[in-house]
Every structure is written in structure tokens, then in C-alpha cells.
Amino acid sequence: MNQRRLSVLSSFLLAGLGYSGLVLTWAVAARGAEKTALPPAAAHQVDFHREILPILANRCITCHARGRAEGGFSLETRTSTLQESDSGRAVLPGNSRDSLLIAMVAGVDPEQVMPKQGRRLSSEEVGLLRAWIDQGVSWDADVSLRTLTLRAWKPRAVELPPVRPGLTHPIDRLMGPYADKHGLDLNATVDDRTFARRLYYDLIGLPPTSEELQSFLSDPGPDKRDRLAGALLDDRPRYADHWLSFWNDLLRNDYEGTGYIDGGRQQITPWLYDALLTNKPLGQFVRDLIEPAAGAEGFVKGIVWRGAVNASQRPPIQAAQNLAQVFLGINLKCASCHDSFVSPWKLDDAYGLAGVFADQPLEIFRCDKATGKFADPQFLNSELGQLTTGADRPARQKELARLVTDDQNARLRRTIVNRLWGRFFGRALVEPVDEIDNPAWNEDVLDWLAADLGANGDDLKHLMRQIVTSRAYQMPSVGAEPSDSKEFVFRGPQVRRLTAEQFLDTIWMCTDAGPTQSAGNFNSAGSTAGGRSLTGQWIWSYAEGDAKPGEQIMVRRKFELATQPVKAWAVITCDNEFTLWVNGQQLASSKDWQHPVTVRLEAALQAGPNEIQILARNAGDRPNAAALFFEAKISLATGEALTIPSDDQWQWTGTVPSASGKLPGDESDWKPAVAVKNQGFLSPDIRDKLAQAAERGEKGLFVRVALVTADPLMRALGRPIRDQVVTTRPESFTTLEALDLTNGAILAGLLSRGADNLLRQHADWTAEQAADFIFLNFLSRSPTPAERELATRIAGAPLAREGLADLLWSVVMLPDFQLIR
């Protein structure tokens, strides 16, 4: 039958039967001459759970399961699949060539292809279905697509293949058959220098310093890569600083934005940072967000949008959408308005999950119109468990948290494993990452890692270490697959662009040009160094008695330095608020006295006289205790170290800055400050937080991009506005980014400040020395002779700020800097 006749016949059938009746009737007519157009059947024994069920669940059941049987054809069970439909039997066990299902999904007539909406099945998927039918239509007895019992919910045990030469790591053993099939050499790994730069950026978001890199390169130990991975994962503050951005994107947490001003949204930063700092197990992490724990309420609270909004954006619906997307790999956004056209999820599913988070019975809206029906709170998979009828909201959320993190729910671990694999390799095992029901390019790796995560206490650092110590991770990088590629083939980690945070953190780290204070009021110290010695006292204008509500005083300390400091930092807090100036330059402020702030001081200090001034303010609605704590550590080029604690050498005045910001200067007003006798401020918790903040300063841990409010340059580099869940950032280079990198004032100012700092710290540098430093610290390698010659011409002689800033700009524009290879 030729193509023209097929088209004519299909037109007649469409007119006479309607589209749904056409599904199989057309295939009867098409059976015959077009059989040669079918993709070949897969040559191996197919696995129903691993290979067939994801295809049926994602591409077929919207029309042919869950109570629907268009054309009289149902895929809910094996029995219904083999039954007669309106147009005869669609599946003939042992005979895929004559099975109408195959003719339809293969698209013998390109004008009539199943599924009706969404992407077509690939040739590989059709081949799997053919092999499944030819091999007898196997079907696990516990699977029913009426209740959507998908494989992704169930754990699957994976047996590790035997050890082979060079392939001893579990991931590499699992990858062995795949490597054989596709001609991959898992023993071909990158050199130490490339590996170190890749690993540092992936685990802590920074490149190795020249000292760290040299230490690693000179290490003769055969296990040094494994040890480096362990050391970086154990670096709690730098690990937490880096991964905060990943989770902020997923949990749509930020420091400012929609909802924060009027209380319609709540930050979870202190809870989240502490969870990363302490490596909270995944199960507990998720339970804390769903139940929720103190400080974590903002995730399920969502955003209370101003004005009229679509019913699908009410906070309970947001909670259901975000939970399903982030932790279960399910897209409920379409199903929050109507039954989804692209997935099996229905309106009742979305509203059932949303009902868990509603204080009152939740009326169901279809396409923003009330239906008069109310949702019964329920989990997305009833076979894992039912919610207690009539339970109040806290009880429902507690039960939901248990179901989401239940050991029999492998979906949570599979989803997180997939997200982290995508983070480290540039492409996940399952794409898109929010559709975990799609087939993985290596199901065994995904399932084994998910089981291994559970067997090791849901330790995410353990999972990360498993991934980055594999030879698969250490393979040479490759370019991304073409967008029109029919089948993804893993050939190594994909080349990735630095994130906004990695890009700017590197500049800030190497030039000391970053901010002095984080945006969030949270403990970003990274150590529980409770025994660290701090000599500062809590001071005020009087020793005992309560301060009045709103009482403000200025305190100051004058001192001299023999030289410009090479390093200086301070830890400061005030019950209740403070603003800090150093030599007239405002450096920091805070309204949360229970979270001490670490501030970098060296750029504001100078050789000769210096003055620190602090505006301290009491709060509350009745008289209460008030006090200020400050301690600075200053290191000079001579090797001298100074400590400036808050004590009786400080002075205070009741005169506060003017409306224009002018600081008090009348010397007659200043009186000696005194130590506060009521040292109730020194609770163990506050002492520990002060010690942690001091350790951050002592280690030279600068304020990272993840800890500050986004500016236009960060936005141009891809940091998102987090009023929606962001699971992947764009890899494409935009016009806005090009403009900001070439002509933007923010980057130009940053590089100029960085050049000033480097010149101050290395006053005797030649242009060649500057070039060596910049290449080693930005690119993790020395410049080639040609690069060194060009760099010295750019920097100029004698070395000056403009030339050094130009050299910095030239280097950060290089692909070698902007790409993780």
C-alpha cells in the first residue's frame, strides 16, 4: 500500500470513526507492505521493570490506563493488554511485526503516530517493545498501571559484576558492560592537574590555591585522589558555602525577593546552612522540610503572592508541586490545573498531595474554575501507605514525611542520585532530571547508587565520594551531545561552564576583592571550636541595669599600626543590633545578635592611626539587657600580630551618626566603656558561635557568593531569581552575559579593586611574577612562554593597577578559566 493510499484511507477512517476509534483500525489497514519500516527488535532479553514499564508509564497510560481505554485498548494489566479492543488485539505475544501497537508507535504512517501528544518513541524504545512482545509479553504480577505502581518507587537490588583489571570501583564495575558495548576505555583518566581543578570546583566550588595544587601534585601516594576527595568533603565550611547554592536553587530559598518584605515568604537559610555543615542525612533533611523542623518552615509555606493568583499557585499547591519535583522527580505543575497531557498525573493527584498542607478542606479548581469538590489528602502512591483520615495538618505532614522517606520508596534516593550525577557529569543518568520515570542510560548504576546511599545512612557525602572516586568521573571531558542526537552515549564527563558562584568566588578568593559580610543572619563558620580562646568582653555604657528600648550608643577604639596589615578580621555581635565603621568606611551591620558576624578588615585599615566605630542599639518593648562584643585579629607584614578586643580601652558616647551619616567627632563626649556584669550573654551556644565565627576569620574564609544577595552580574552569569524551583541552570552564553563581561561596571570595578589589593600585598612584584600568580591561581597551571610574554606586555612595567586589572580581565575571559574540563 503506497503512502498516498494510506493517507486517503486514514482520512476516510478519521471521518467515519473519530480519532479514538482510529488508533487501532488504521493499524489493521496499514499492516502489510510497510512492515519493513519497523525498527529491529532489541537483541537481548528485556527487563520489564527496567526497560518496558518506564515506556508504558510515561508515553501510553494517559490514554490507555488509570481508568481510560481509548479505542477499547487498556494497558493497565497484562490481561487487559492482550484482550480484544475495538479494533481487535493490539498485542500478539511472539509476533511484534503483526502487533498493531508496534505499527502505531513506530509511526508507519507519519500522520498517525502514537502517542498523540509529546515526543515520539525512539527507534530504540520501539525495538525494546518489539523484543518484549516477541519474548512473550512478560509482566510482573505486582504491577498494575491502574494504580500507577511504577518501578521508580521500588528498590531494586543490583549485583556488582566481577572485578576486572583496572575496574575495581563499584561504578566502574557496573559501567564495564556499557563500556564494552560503546568502546569506552574507563582506564583512560585525566592528569593530576586537571583532576584536581575539576574536583575542587565540584566539591567546594573553588580552584586549588597554588600551594594546595603543588602539595597534591608532589604527593607520590597511589591513593592520593581518593584522599583528596575525602579531605575536600571533610572541609565543612567550604563544602557548605558551595552546596548552599545548589539547595537554594532547589528549595527556592534566597535572601530577598518576592514575599520576603511582607512576611509572605520565609527564609530557611540558617537551618539549611546548618544541615549542610553537619551533613544531615538525606532522610532527616527531607523530613525536616516536610513536617517541618524549626527554621525549615519556609519550604512548605511557599510564597503568598500579592493580589489575585491562579488557584494552582496557592501555597498548598506550591508545596505539593515543589516536594514532588525536587524529591520525587515528578512534574505536577500541569496536573495542578487539569489532568496532565504529558504525564500520567491527574488533577486529583496534585490536589490530594496539596491537601496534606492545607489548614482547611481544599476545593479542587480545574483550569482556575471551582468544581465544588474537595480533595482527600493523600500520597501519590497509595501502596506505600495511606494517610490517616481526619488527621490534622501537622499529623498529615508527619505521615507524609514518613512515606516520602520510607525505605521502600526508592524514588527519593534515585532522584537525588540522579541530580548529583548530573551535577558532576554535566548530564544526568535520567533526563530531564525532573522526570525520573524516564529510562536511564544506565539503570544499574542509578539503582546501585540509590541502594548504596540508603545502606550508608543516607550520607550525601558518601554518595559524592563514590561518584568522584570512580574512573568514570576521572575520564577526559567531552563536548555536550548534539541537541538532535537520537540516543545519548556516555563518553566521559561533559565540559561545563563555571557557575556564577564559581566564577566570582575565584576572583574574590585570589584578589581579596569580595564583600566583608554575608547577607543572611546565620552561622557560616564551619567549626565547633568551642575551646578557642577569645579575650573580648561584653561592653556597654554602664555595668549593670537594663537598657531602655531603642537605646543607642556609639563605641569606638583608636589604635596605630606600624604597617599596612596583610590579614585582619574581626568577629562582632550586639544584643540587639550594630553597624560597624572602620576609618569612616561602613563594613557590616546585623540585627541578629545570636549569629555573630565575621568581617574582613585589611582593606579598610592603614599604616598609622586607625579608628573603629560601632553604633550599638537595644531593641524590645521594655527595658532589657544590652551589650556589644568585638574582637579583631591583625597580622602585619613584619610578622607582628595584634588583638583588639572589646574591653575598658573602648569609649562610648550617646551621640549617634547624623541623618547624613556623619560620625560623631566631638572628643569631649566620649567616656570609658565598661564590661557588663550580667554575663548571661555568654551562654554555651553563643560562646560556641563566637568561636566558630573566629575560626572562620582565622582560616581566612572569605564571604562566598552563595552567602550574599545577587547583583546584576551574578544574574547575568546565571544565578536565578528563586521564586520558582530551579533544578538546572542554562549552559548557553547570553548576550547580556557578554555585555556584562566585556563592558560591565561591576566586573570592571571588582578587577580594579583586586588589582589594588594584589599590588598592596605584593609591592615588589614584576609583571612576570604577577602573570605566574594569576595563571596558577585562576587556571591551575603556569603560563606558556608565549602567554607569559603577552601577559607581561598587558600588565606593563612598572606594574600598575590598570595594567594588572587588564591582565586579570584577560585571564578570566579565557575558556581555560570559564570551563570545567
Image (cartoon, helix red, strand yellow):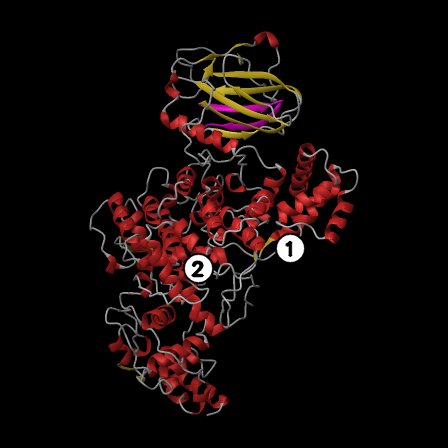
What kind of secondary structure does the magenta stretch mostly adopt? strand
In this view, the mark in front (2 or 1): 1
To which residue does mark 1 refer?
Answer: 815
**In front: 468, or 322?**
468
Segment tinted magenta in the rendering: 576-591
**In front: 333, or 485?**
485
Say which element carries label 1. helix
Q: Residue at point 30% right, 53% down?
A: 404
Quadrant hosting residue 538: top left
To which residue does mark 2 refer?
Answer: 433
x, y (%) of residue 102? 38, 81
Q: Which of marks 2 and 1 is nearer the N terminus?
A: 2
**In front: 455, or 553?**
455
x, y (%) of residue 392? 23, 44
**In front: 239, or 367?**
239
Q: Which amino acid does label 1 sit on?
A: Pro
Q: In this view, does 69 lie above or below 576?
A: below
Say which element carries label 2. loop
x, y (%) of residue 314? 38, 48
